[in-house]
Amino acid sequence: MGCIEVNFDGLVGPTHNYAGLSRGNLASSANRGLVSSPRRAALQGLAKMRMLHERGFMQAVLPPQERPLVAWLRHLGFRGRSDAEVLAVAAGTEPEWLAAASSASAMWTANAATVTPAPDSKDGRLHLTPANLYAMPHRAIEAPFTAAVLRRIFRDAGRFYVHDPLAGGAALADEGAANHTRLAAAHGSPGLHFFVYGRAAARGSREGSPGHFPARQTLEASRAVARRHGIVEERTLYLQQHPDAVDAGVFHNDVICVGHLGTLFVHERAFSNGEAAFGEIKRRFAEVAGERLRMVCVPESRVSLAEAVRSYLFNSQLLDLPGGGCLLVAPEECRRSDAVRGFLDECVADPDCPLKEVLFFDLRESMRNGGGPACLRLRVVLRAEDLAALGARVVVDGVILDELEAWVRRHYRETLMPADLADPALLEESRRALEELTGILRLGWIYAFQGVADAKPNRLREEAEAAD
Ligand code: SUG
């Protein structure tokens, strides 16, 4: 099957800010209350998209969500005659809910969904499960809109199947592609899907779980996603995150591991039972793909777990180079770390290492919330003919990137402080920006403020709470 990989990057929203909402995400906690720059954040993201597009990679974009999500604040009982009054009431009584309702966290599209390409599903369609992001309220409210927007884009039911987010509460907490890796000989060949979870809900107890920080993804959620996507059992593998890694700030597996086709770049302390886990990945990959996995395993002695989290080395993108081998798209912070830089220099100089080139990107605005290059993109492997079936203008070229850049410059604030979240002018500006964006991306009306019910916090979330 002739398939290509498309990276869907999240467009940073106009309310990008530092609210310290994610316990266990060290950057989010450390940068709480800092002044953010929504404009710079969005332009940094677009610069990454432009560079990869110009290098010949297929690049697409997903729109920001509506924030502050006034419909959710009303759902939580904050009342007012106008939306501005609702913001004022929330800000004056429980400002943490206003912060949660204002987060631009949907920019990290690696958490938008888990994706199973057509060659791996029993019915031959591309399957997507929007992540319920159950672990954190400011992220859990993303799920309904994510499902709605994915359904707009992947609307051809003969080719694509966008499932509902998993219901069932904490036992089925799902963080999407950030905890899933597909390894394959080629994009169109059958892949090995390895899912990484933080805790097994059925065991109930704390067995193998981190002691300090929350483990977000459950084994049960990963299994449910694999089952509903129709991946044959022989091509799945479930591994547990090392509890020390979670406690060191690895809140998603993509903070410590990245895989692409036949290459895996990983820290030695990523998984419980490290050696056995690596052996299992290699053995299973060889069975599925019929070739050897190229694994680059970074030892603690070269880059410590703490340095890996500080630099976000593994939250890099791996992309195919035309001459063979991989391009690593890494955060700028890696260049500044002697240990990381030294390791990467050696890799690139070694003819046996699959990493052939490294590009560093300044994504500081997103990084301060714990989001590196890999967090910002959702990989979707499509058949060439699927591209024409996409239901919006989301695959970017130079023209669209220019339009999006001008749009950001027209609408986004240079700076934002947590106290600004209650400013009714910010709400108006954000809505004006999103209204215009639906036109640029030809999405049609999709936001709750445009009267679209699907985008509102819906009954799925209430079902989940009831089941808890
Ligand atoms: O869920 N940060 C996000 C970062 C997500 C990164 N994604 C991947 N690793 N794939 C999170 O912790 C912080 C928001 C704040 O504190 O204002 C936040 O939501």
Image (cartoon, rainbow, N blue to C red):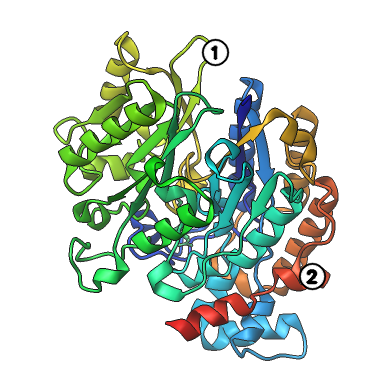
Q: Which image quadrant: the C terminus? A: bottom left
- Residue at mark 1: 322
Residue contact between numbered discs 1 and 2, judged by CB atoms under 8 Å:
no
Residue 413 in sight: no
- Residue at mark 2: 452
- Identify the mark at residue 195; answer none if there is no mark: none
Is 372 displayed left or right of 204 in the figure? right
Is 216 displayed left or right of 440 in the figure? left
- The residues bearing labels 1 and 2 have C-alpha atoms spaced at a distance of 43 Å
In the image, residue 100 lies at what x, y percent? 53, 71
Instruction: Give above or below for 59 relative to 61.
Output: above
Secondary structure at numbered mark 1:
loop
- Which quadrant holds residue 28? bottom left
Decide: few, some or many residues near mark 1? Use Cα within 10 Å; few <14, some 14-19, many ≥20: few
Q: What kind of residue is marked 2?
A: Val
In the image, residue 158 lies at what x, y percent? 74, 47
Residue 360 in sight: yes
Q: Residue at x 54, y 72 (%)?
A: 99
Instruction: Give above or below for 384 relative to 131.
Output: above
In the image, residue 73 lies at what x, y percent? 62, 81
